Amino acid sequence: MRIRTTTLTRVGAAFLASTLLVTGCADSGGDKDNDKDKSEKSSMSKDEIWAGGVYGADDGGTPKDGGTLTVGDYGEPRSLDPTVTIPNGAVGASAMAAIYDVLMRWDDEAGAYVPQLAESLTSDDNTTWRLTLRKGVKFSDGTPVDAAAVMGSIGYYMSNQGFNTLLLYTNLSEMKPVDATTIDFVMKAPWASFPAMLATGPGMIVAPKAIAGGKDKFKPIGAGPFVFEDYKPSEELVLTRNDDYFGERPHLDKLRFVWPASDQARMDSLKRGDIDQASVRTPGVVEEARTSGTAGALVPVGLGSMVWINNREGRPGADERLRKAMDLAFDPEAFLERTADGHGIASRNIYTPSAPYYTEVTTPETNIAEAKKLVEEAKADGVSTKLVYLGQSDQTSKTAAVTIQAMLEAAGFTVQVELLNNIADQTSRIYVTHDYDIASSSMSIPVDDPYSRFSSQLIGASPANPSGYSNPEMDKLIGSLQAATGEEATSILTQINELWQETVPGIAIAPGGFFFPWNENVHGILPSSEFLMLYHQAWKS
């Protein structure tokens, strides 16, 4: 039987069209935009910039060796163990990818997952996926990256409940070695977007010595282009070039990650040259970057801006009436006007317009009178309407908190605001301890693989479900999405959107995206899945 490779016609056709990903933007390879000047880039409309892609970059000529690239990252990882830190570029996973690499990566230009640390990933039926490793690749400690090491790493990831572990346990029937460099992943049912798993946390392969002492004695040893040098919490994480990297020897001497407190602080640091690359998501800051002609990569997402509602028993949000009341009291357009000077696209639709599966659905209009009625009904039944709102402490987040507080209190809620000093603490409160009633956040539904995001954050039994939302109909829809492609996938995704509008797991504000701007002397950064930035080809002129 002929084995077909993962291409746009296989995985891409299920959920995306690469041409949509780069609408209005330069080619993601970075070499087709040389004839565009900054004024042309700055004239792109708001809708065009949110379409995503890499733009404003040139190849810079012949790569140069040496130097340190300083990244103003969005969130601090706190731990380099992929099972401890959510392996997402928003919370420091780009540093982990630099140490461990990833088996696969998302190629925006090709519109497909392509091999990175692996040599290939193939399937003829989306049920059995064969992973072939590159021969002769070694971890930085000199041990081989072979089938046993890869299976051991993924086994460690699953046994320690890394992000999306439930998704793997639910769908993966067997993981078996074929030979020293080949592994078969056998699914219980066809899984069209399985390659996405190997492009993120499970695909970050840690060395056997890294996990030999168990989780408490984890050591950051991988086969990536950089190795761990030093970590000073809240100050910096420094990585040094791995001279024995399997691919072309990395150009940079070092990678340095720092964590300015806000999007604006990161953008200001970039302008001053204190950092070489930033990570921002606030619509106003993204707009500032694009109108200045700054080069970078933008990854569009659905629910780029939202408010999670804690649906768990004992919380006000457990009552669907109150969730609907919060939604009806909230005005997304007014919120963006007050917090982002009107930048961004106010929408209760949970998908980005860039997604090929995007469809218009009926969404509720802001209605304070109806919200008040629902709040009074709940109060009459003895349900608490006192809410603790969780947000950040930068000025934009403070404005957001006050705005949300005013909107909800106008409907009869009492809202106590609690502002935190960093992303890591907020992530822990929302995703680990679930200690909040409502929280400013983002579901960040990716264009390339919405199934994985829904499985982790909306299925009731998922340990990564931040809101505790549990709905059998939603679980069934998400389950049916696993093998769906083309029009069937679009239909299911539309039904998920409609059920969201009906049951309100959270408040949708706007689609958005992570923007990763870099200075003119920076070249070769490759964006991948889950907002990861890969630096194995990066260099500075």
Image: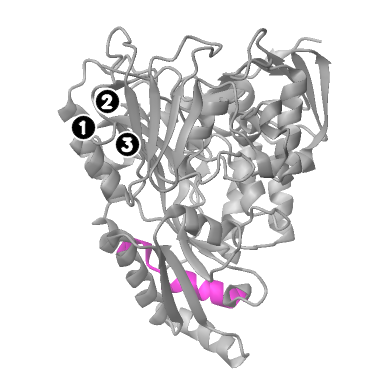
As shown in the figure, which amino acid type bears the numbered disc 3?
Glu
Quarter of the figure that contains the C terminus: top left
Q: Secondary structure at mark 1?
A: loop
Mark 3 secondary-structure assignment: helix
Mark 2: which amino acid?
Answer: Gly
- Examine the rendered structure and indicate whether residue 291 appears above or below residue 128: below
Identify the residue at horizontal 15%, vertical 29% (top origin).
Answer: 39
Residue topped by disc 2:
56
Q: Badge 3 is on which residue?
A: 48
Q: Which residue is mark 1?
A: 293
Mark 1 vs 2: CB contact within 8 A: yes
Residue count near mark 2 (Cα–Cα under 10 Å), binned few <14, some 14–19, many ≥20: many
Measured Cα–Cα span from mark 2 to mark 3: 14 Å
Kindly check if marks 1 and 3 are in contact, taking CB atoms under 8 A apart as contact. no
Distance from disc 1 to disc 3, alpha carbons, whole Å, reads 14 Å
Is residue 349 something that shows in the picture?
no
Q: Tag 3 or tag 2, which sits nearer the N-term? A: 3
Q: Which residues are magenta?
A: 319-335
Q: Can you say which quadrant of the picture contains the N terminus?
A: top right
> Residue drawn 27% across and 56% down?
340
Of callouts 1 and 2, the N-terminal one: 2
Q: Nearer the viewer, mark 1 or mark 3?
A: 1
Left or right of 1: which side holds 340? left
Which residue type does callout 1 highlight? Gly
Tell me: 491 left or right of 330. Answer: right
